[in-house]
Image (cartoon, grey):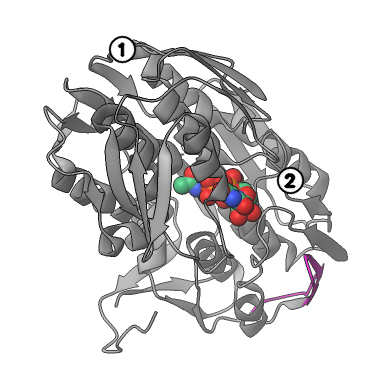
Amino acid sequence: MDRIAITGGARLQGEIPISGAKNSAIKLMAASLLTDEPLRLTNMPRLADTRFLGKLLARLGAEVVESEGPDGPETLLTTREIVSGFAPYELVRQMRASFNVLGPLLARNGQAKVSLPGGCSIGARPVDLHLKALEALGAKIDLHEGYVYAQAPRGLQGAVIDFPFNSVGATEHAMLAAVLAHGDTVLENAAAEPELADLADCLNAMGAKVSGAGTRTIHIQGVSRLSGTTHAVVPDRIETGTYAMAAAIAGGEVRLTRTRSDFIQALLDKMVEAGVDVTPHSDGLTIKRNGARLNAVEITTEQYPGFATDLQAQFMALMTLADGESVFRETIFENRFMHVPELARLGADISVHGGEARVRGVASLEGAQVMATDLRASVSLVIAGLAAQGETVVNRVYHLDRGFERLEEKLCACGAQVRRLKGDGEEEVE
Ligand code: UD1
């Protein structure tokens, strides 16, 4: 299993191009199942998660071709026919968003058997809202031996679905299913993340009739068929925010390009409050910090446009060196402080009580061996390593490879000292 070694202390100077959003790309790939025509996705991130999903889609009947287009990586997905409606545990377990093939399979094929994804390191993460939404659209759902057996032999029917709380995955799933349903669907109390609007834009370009995506109420007028199109994946706001914090902790000046600063406004407001210099521009933003210690600030994770839970671990890394005590309230996932003991190995002073963490800023961090249990936690350790004295080695790099494209290369291009160590001879136990 590879590791990443970071020698702390280098200031960052330069430009980092941001990739397409992982969390959008995987839902757009699932959308390709809704049509027998080719869907060409540009600005595709090349990640372990997109590869996992590509494997699953190929098994269901898609032809998946990756290439380098004039504007970067592309993936062409063509599913002339669904050859199987079966998504096995081994593939869904590797990447839980694979579960979202259920809706498209049902909408196009009338039936599907898809593994339940199971829990994950950041919490139980049930899919009850996904299943209730599909049932509301007329699907008959049975659960046996860890699998969802779903049927809608006469197609899905439009419905009004009022979500009890905002769920990104369930809203996307309902949208993916309802576009081919008979009649109209209204999704109330929908999630409003930018990836939802991106999915709706792509579906509309395929001939769907979706309005209101990106707000709490989404209207969908069902259509009988969808066609192919070309769609550029929206920039990754989590990658953008992560590199913004990398630049802030290391110091220096970094320009983040091919992205949008408005997607991470809640984070940028907190960074400015902490003392980081942030300048938005038409193609992204510039982050600058010259030496002075940052101020401690409080954050509470919320649904978009609030402070993203996927940026909480990285912001905590930043606050480990701030002046004073900062408070973190995690409201989206119940078990999302797994990075705390690892940050403590680097010398951070953090205590956790339920959904709240208190970080008392220390004067310096010291490099150590660390390990993380999820994607965003892993990258928070890389960020801390950029400012720690000496060498930090982050184990279990496969978490990073799931969601960050060419991380070492992007950071090294700005002067960071980050390298990948191949293999460690240890068996991974998950
Ligand atoms: C997506 C993102 C993830 C991000 C999260 C919140 C992808 C692939 N992942 O995850 O990176 O951290 O949004 O912004 O896009 N819940 C239920 N029942 C359900 C569904 C969700 O109880 O059926 C709960 C979850 O356990 C969680 C909360 O709702 O506590 C929000 O989860 P949700 O918005 O669905 O997150 P994901 O779509 O899984």
Q: Is residue 117 left or right of residue 109?
A: right
The residue sitting at 62% across, 84% down in the picture is 345
The residue sitting at 59% across, 77% down in the picture is 389
Q: Residue furthest right?
A: 324
> Which quarter shows the C terminus?
bottom left
Instruction: Tell me residue 60's x, y (percent).
Output: 18, 43
Is residue 58 visible from the viewing direction of this image? yes
Is residue 46 visible from the viewing direction of this image? no
The numbered mark at residue 271 is: 2
Q: Is residue 71 left or right of residue 405?
A: left
**What span is colored magenta in the figure?**
351-365
Instruction: Tell me residue 381's x, y (percent).
Output: 55, 69
The numbered mark at residue 224 is: 1
Which amino acid does the dot numbered 1 rest on? Ser
Q: Is residue 122 left or right of residue 157?
A: right
Instruction: Tell me residue 114's x, y (percent).
Output: 32, 51
Q: In terms of image quadrants, where is residue 418? A: bottom left
Asked if residue 317 is positioned above or below residue 413 in the image, the reply reads below
The residue sitting at 55% across, 65% down in the picture is 377
Verify whether residue 371 appears in magenta. no
Is disc 2 placed on a helix, strand or loop?
helix
Q: Is residue 147 left or right of residue 212?
A: left
Which of 79/294 is in front?
Answer: 79
Which amino acid does the dot numbered 2 rest on? Met
Which of 145/75 is in front?
Answer: 145
The numbered mark at residue 20 is: none
Asked if residue 169 is positioned above or below residue 300 in the image, the reply reads above
Q: Residues within 10 Å of mark 2 (few under 14, many from 20)?
A: many
Is disc 1 placed on a helix, strand or loop?
loop
* Real-space CA distance between mark 1 and mark 2, rounded to the nearest whole angstrom: 47 Å
Q: In terms of image quadrants, where is residue 396? A: bottom left
Instruction: Tell me residue 246's x, y (percent).
Output: 57, 55
